[in-house]
Image (spheres, rainbow, N blue to C red):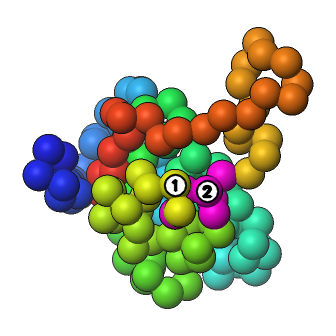
Amino acid sequence: WASGKIPVILDPSGRTDIFFRYRHTSCLDVRNILLRSIGGEEHLTLMEEMRKRLVAGMKHGSTLVVMMGDAAPCLLSKFSHSKYFPTREIFEIDKIRLQKHWSLVVRDEDMRVPGASENVRWFDVHKEFNVAV
């Protein structure tokens, strides 16, 4: 991560997915998203789920683990949207840290500060946020 590269972990046993699920990570099961898309679930509903996982990782400084399983959907076309899941910016981690990119994805409710007054809003990408595939 220090070099700005995204690690790709290949593990046919599935143990790595289990490991990440028990760690401080934000897991995005892309295989599940793809299957639900094929099954007819509304595309924007799926994109919103992806957005929420991304925002959770950015906000709390956890790793966004993009779990592919045995699927290989095209994240650059079908599952990329500047206001939900900007794939290019996510996989070029320095870009998603820029306010001009993350501000398109972050909603008002994501900016609420727990324990603060209802009208207090703040968001920044946590310095520990990373992505792994």
- The Cα–Cα distance between marks 2 and 1, rounded to whole angstroms, is 5 Å
| Residue ID for mark 2 | 103
Q: Is residue 43 left or right of residue 13?
A: right
Q: Main secondary structure of the magenta part?
A: helix
| Residue 14, percent from left and from top | 31, 48
Residue 21 showing in the rendered view: no
Q: Between 55 and 72, which is closer to the camera in this rendering? A: 55
| Residue 66, percent from left and from top | 40, 56
Q: Is mark 1 on a helix, strand or loop?
A: helix
Which region shows up in magenta? 101-106
Callout 2 amino acid:
Ser
Q: Does the magenta run of residues contain 104?
A: yes
Q: Which residue lies furthest to the right in this view?
A: 118
- The image quarter containing residue 78 is bottom right
Contact? badges 2 and 1 (CB < 8 Å): yes
Q: What residue appears at the point 88 percent right and 25 percent down from the top-left corner?
A: 118
Q: Residues within 10 Å of mark 2 (few under 14, many from 20)?
A: some
- The image quarter containing residue 109 is top right
Q: What residue appears at the point 41 percent right and 52 percent down from the top-left corner?
A: 97
| Residue 61, percent from left and from top | 43, 32
Q: In this view, does 35 lie to the left or right of 14?
A: right
Q: Between 90 and 108, which is closer to the camera in this rendering? A: 108
Q: What residue appears at the point 60 percent right and 38 percent down from the top-left corner?
A: 123
Question: Which part of the image, by quadrant, shows the C terminus?
Answer: bottom left
Query: Which numbered circle lies on residue 99?
Result: 1
Callout 1 amino acid:
Gln
Q: Which residue lies furthest to the left in this view?
A: 3
From the viewer's perspective, is residue 64 above or below residue 8? above
Q: Between 130 and 25, which is closer to the camera in this rendering? A: 130
